[in-house]
Image: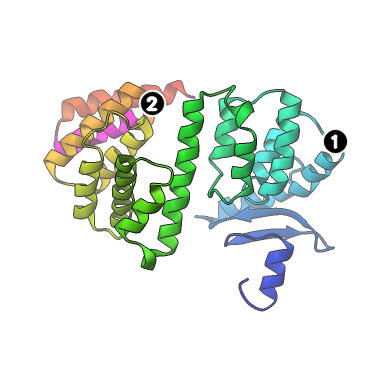
Amino acid sequence: MEKGEGIKLAKKYKINSYPTYLFLNSKGEEIHRGLGSYSNENDFIKVAKDAQDPNRNLSVLKQRFEKGENNSDFLKNLITLTINIDPDFSINVFERYLNSKGQIDKEDIKLLTSHIISTKSSLYNFFQEKKAIIIKAISEEEYSALDKKIKINTLVKSFQQNSNKFNDDSFLAEAGKFLGREEAENELLKFKASQALYNKDIATYENLTLKIFKDYSTANYQELNSAAWAFFEKVNTKSSLEMAIIWAQESIKKDKNYYNTDTLANLYKKIGDDVQAKKWEEEASNLKLSKK
């Protein structure tokens, strides 16, 4: 798709990521698409079946939208199906969805922000434009935290794509445009830790993560659980695993759920504390069953 007639096809069908699977009708018009690699044939078959399902077929759904369909459940489903593949169209759907619903809630905000990959995206512009509505559902501080996270992700992605231009000073200079010095230095450590983990340099990853979460009081439950789980999977130093147990415990204090209780159970099992491992295995199992 990056040379020859592929360039024209990518432009015509608005293909922004690879692999993309297009389902076309006899006129060459797109009726559905699938994104990304599929781990097995059943996942791909499901996408093909979706193309035949009037509730999942994008061509049919878009026609209903163009005819003025105003049902909020229909509109939210259409946003979910298009936000990755056609963000500009999904913004139009979002506008109608908000007008139909009359408000935005936390679930809607998560749907929007979880798909913003860059401050250069149209979805980010929409996020900014709708600030007045969004802060009716969340606090100004929560909005600022989401905005900051998007900016950090944009910065990190930029340095990942241009690793030859990366150095500590350049990262801190860019991060300093929207973060304080201490926050910027912490994000630099996180970036280096993620690169070390990607490169399978576990010793460096371990040391950097211990520095990052030396003061874990401001970390959210997801960050703490993610670090604790990574230590369970990759780290074997007992003192570091004991620190990861503290992170998992703190994650549970902030938001007890199946994932962090399961992490804690696995960490206890790894250090040989079978009594605590069994206790938290049962807790995790109960939480999982309660969600069904």
- Residue 184 location in percent, x, y? 34, 45
Residue displayed at 51% across by 23% down:
139
Magenta region, mostly helix, strand or loop? helix
Q: CA separation, marks 1 and 2?
A: 41 Å
Residue count near mark 1 (Cα–Cα under 10 Å), binned few <14, some 14–19, many ≥20: few
Mark closest to the chain's N terminus, 1 or 2: 1
Front-lying residue, 274 or 245: 245
- Residue 53 location in percent, x, y? 74, 44
In magenta, the rendered stretch is 260-272
Front-lying residue, 165 or 160: 165
Is residue 270 shown in magenta? yes
Residue at the spot of label 2: 257
Query: Tag 1: residue type?
Result: Gly
Residue at the spot of label 1: 68
Asked whether residue 74 appears in the rendered view, the answer is no
Q: Do the residues labelled 1 and 2 touch (CB within 8 Å)?
A: no
- Residue 60 location in percent, x, y? 80, 45
- Left or right of residue 161, residue 224 in this image: left
Query: Tag 2: residue type?
Result: Asn
- Left or right of residue 129, residue 71 in this image: right
Image height check: is 184 above or below 252? Answer: below
